[in-house]
Image: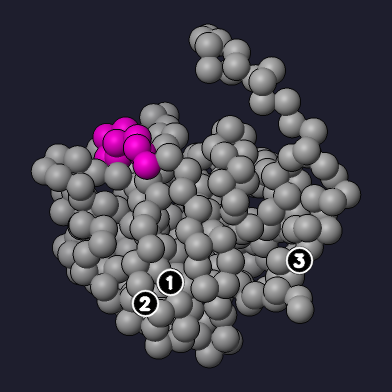
Amino acid sequence: MPRKVKCGLIQCGLPLHEGEGTVAKIKEAMIDKHLKMIDQAGKKKVQILCLQEIFSTPYFCPSQDAKWYATAEAVPGPTTDLLSKYAKKYKMVIVVPMYERAAAGVYYNTSAVIDADGEYLGKYRKIHIPQVAGFWEKFFFKPGNLGYPVFETAYAKVGVYICYDRHFPEGARCLGLNGAEIVFNPSATVAGLSQHLWKLEQPAHAVANGYFMGCINRVGTERPWKIGKFYGHSYFVNPRGEILAEGSEDHDEVVTIDIDLDKIDEVRNTWQFYRDRRPETYDELGMLLP
């Protein structure tokens, strides 16, 4: 019997910008906006839904302002508890990228995974943390320390790779080896230097590892920061590298697609990348230093 799953991605812009309310109010407004979009996804019978990177706040990393630390919270915690109710209501797996407070002064860029019965399954912490102009992430996030977990959900084996992670093929391979059938990459990426990579790297990961990917990006500009426009174009890609569904450049929307997980076996039986791997020859990857 075919294993068909309806998947969704939420892309949206800020309802409140810095200066239009306290950080708590900005966070509250963003969560409220997402709850309405989760309701939309539920009405569309989405079974697995992923939100965008640090979904409940602006992408505040162009600043180095410690006030945003106040938006971090425990994972699991209040926001995952809230979204667990929505997961249970709609029998929907929800991937929740958010700002995690692990301890005083210790913060991670994290994605929680909630199963269709509302159970919190665990979390992935972003491993690769950039530190370049406009993306001062090391000021806000400690590098992840939980490896590359894959979560056995009600509908599929789900992995998560967050934004800058996508530039590193090693972790994408680890997710495949750990059994991922669909990998979500919630991102915050703007027009410019990396835009042409948006539809190169992730289809390449999907092909090299024989899984589906759901790739999420924000839309619009976020004031007062001047790093550019988040250009949307959230999309799903299959194990052949074919883009199946794609969002717009500048509109809030829930991008949905029905995927057939049996295509994974079909593709892997054609392209035998896992059979023909030679891990015994790759030891030097861990030894080579720039």
Residue to which mark 3 is pinned:
262
Q: Nearer the viewer, residue 157 or 188?
A: 157
Precedes in sequence: disc 3 or disc 2? 2
Q: Secondary structure at mark 1?
A: loop
Q: Residue at x 14, y 40 (%)?
A: 105
Instruction: Say if the magenta span includes residue 200.
Output: no
Q: Which residue is mark 1?
A: 115
Left or right of residue 19: residue 193:
right
Rendered image coloring scheme? one colour
Q: Amino acid at mark 1?
A: Asp
Task: Decide which of tag 3 and tag 1 comes sooner along the chain.
Answer: 1
**Cα gap from disc 3 to disc 2, whole angstroms:** 26 Å
Determine whether the residue tagged by mark 3 lies in a helix, strand or loop: helix
Residue 257 vs residue 154: left or right?
right
- Tell me what residue is drawn at x 68 percent, y 57 percent: 212
Query: Which secondary structure type mostly characterizes the magenta part of the structure?
Result: loop
Residues shaded magenta: 136-146
Q: Are marks 2 and 1 in contact (CB under 8 Å)?
A: yes
Give the class, few, some or many, for how many residues have Cα within 10 Å of label 2's Cα (few <14, many ≥20): many
**Cα distance in 3D space between marks 3 and 1:** 21 Å
The amino acid type found where label 2 is placed reads: Gly
Label 1 near label 3: C-beta < 8 Å?
no
On residue 118, the disc is 2
Q: Magenta includes 145?
A: yes
Q: What amino acid is found at the position of numbered circle 3 in the picture? A: Asp
The image quarter in which residue 195 lies: top right
